[in-house]
Image (spheres, rainbow, N blue to C red):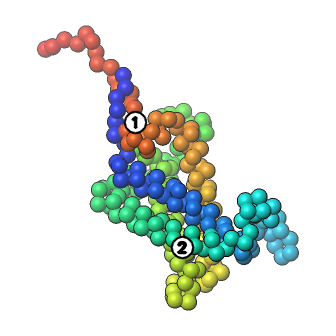
Amino acid sequence: MKKLREKHPLAIRWFHWINFPVLAVMMWSGLLIYWANDVYRIGWGDTTVFKFFPQSFYEALHVPFQLAKGMAWHFVVMWLFVLNGIAYVLYTLISGEWRYLVPGRHALREAWQVVLHDLGIRKAPLPARKYNAAQQIAYSAVVLMGVGSALTGFAIYKPTQLAGLTTLLGGYEWARAEHFILTLGYVLFFVVHVAQVVRAGWNNFRSMVAGFELVDTPASSSNSTRP
């Protein structure tokens, strides 16, 4: 027998679905900005093993010569990203939702069990919780990444006016590199998150859209007798 069970409050769903397109626009506009000073690569000296975005990539997406457009979009949407993040953190603190999201003392060990379970190596069922330990670590890390993105973004946006912050982050070049690395972290999170949503199926996706999920419940015994 199946029944509906509430899983995600309306506020959490709104924060989630606002953040998804906001981050997408932030990364797209950030790419338009990054094109103007494309310096990051993996290699040493004059030897390049891997360059993040070759010229053919920029040309295929019509990225070149759109620096001003990228900066305009990035700095406008940035405020929506920051405000949505602040509202999300405040809501979780006030509502008590943070209790489901903050990893516990044994989170790393439990997260490893989740990884083994997802790979099909561990057959034992996972504890029945709203968020498993791997999700708690990932979602908490994204919040911290958001703080880091905002701080590094402000540091490279106003390096003179916010000289103290820029210096604290290691200087302009380091702050820019940190901002870039955090963006790669978002891309990795997106890929893993979408793959996990697909793996979990429609019921899990629906819970983030409608707020409820279908769960199995033990069927009541039809031959039970009254005392």
Look at the picture and state if 62 lies above or below 222.
below
What residue appears at the point 37 percent right and 46 percent down from the top-left corner? 8
Return the residue found at the far left. 227
Residue 72 image-quadrant placement: bottom right
Identify residue for label 1.
213
* Residue 15 visible to an observer of this rendering: yes
Identify residue for label 2.
75
**Circle 2: residue type:** Phe
Q: Is residue 33 left or right of residue 211?
A: right
Q: Nearer the viewer, residue 163 or 57?
A: 57
What is the secondary structure assignment of the residue under circle 1?
Answer: strand
Labels 2 and 1: the sequence-earlier one: 2
Q: Are the residues at dot 2 and dot 1 in contact (C-beta closer than 8 Å)? A: no
What residue appears at the point 65 percent right and 81 percent down from the top-left corner? 173
**Circle 1: residue type:** Glu
Q: Position of residue 119 (x, y in %)?
A: 61, 39
Residue 176 image-quadrant placement: bottom right
Looking at the image, is mark 2 or mark 1 nearer the viewer? Answer: 2
Q: Position of residue 46 (x, y in %)?
A: 86, 75
Crowd around label 2: few <14 · some 14–19 · many ≥20 (10 Å):
some
Distance from disc 2 to disc 1, alpha carbons, whole Å, reads: 37 Å
* Residue 180 visible to an observer of this rendering: no
